[in-house]
Image (spheres, helix red, strand yellow):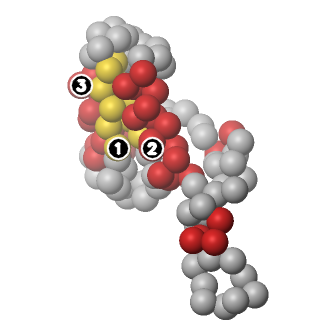
Amino acid sequence: MPSNFPPPESLSTIRQEDIGNVIEGTLSPLNIKSMHIMGKKDRLIPIESSKALLSSYVNPVVHEHDGGHHVPMRAADVRAMMTFIDESFSPEIEVTTDDSKKNCSDHGGGRE
């Protein structure tokens, strides 16, 4: 797991009363990177309920898939999730003019 990926203990479930408070506007939207994966055929959590939470986040990324309440595994779905993870949790690349440090063009765009 990348070193800057959030630790598992920071990823908690949202309680029903918290959802109500956010929707009513008593809590500030969360300013964290978030991707909301929603199944169009989800019977456990209807897509409308998932969409109602979007206002709880600043700039949420939404991905809808054709399935139900599961992590989608189609190539396009996996690609969307991987793109989000890559863009959100890639380490910052330090670009410098100091010759004692390598900049991103010295080693393939910052990744070895």
Whether residue 94 is visible to the viewer of this picture, yes or no, is no
Kindly identify the amino acid type of the residue bearing the numbered disc 3: Glu
Give the Cα separation between the discs numbered 1 and 3: 16 Å
Q: Describe the element under mark 3 as helix, strand or loop.
A: helix
Q: Residue 81's spot in the image, x, y percent?
A: 45, 34
Q: CA distance from mark 2 to mark 1?
A: 8 Å
Instruction: Name above or below for residue 112 compared with residue 56.
Output: below
Residue annotated with mark 3: 48
Give the number of the disc on residue 84: 2
Badge 1 amino acid: Val
Point out residue 18 in the picture as x, y percentages from the top left corner.
Answer: 43, 40
Q: Amino acid at mark 2?
A: Phe
The answer to whether 24 is drawn above or below residue 82 in the figure is below
Seen from this angle, which residue lies furthest right?
A: 100
83 or 23: nearer the viewer: 83
Quadrant of the rendering where the C terminus is positioned: bottom right
The residue to which callout 1 is attached is 61
Q: Are marks 2 and 1 in contact (CB under 8 Å)?
A: yes
Residue at 52% across / 44% down in the picture? 85
Q: Nearer the viewer, mark 1 or mark 3?
A: 1
Which residue reaches farthest left?
48
Q: Are marks 1 and 3 in contact (CB under 8 Å)?
A: no
Q: Earlier in the sequence, mark 1 or mark 3?
A: 3
**Comes first in the chain, label 2 or label 1:** 1
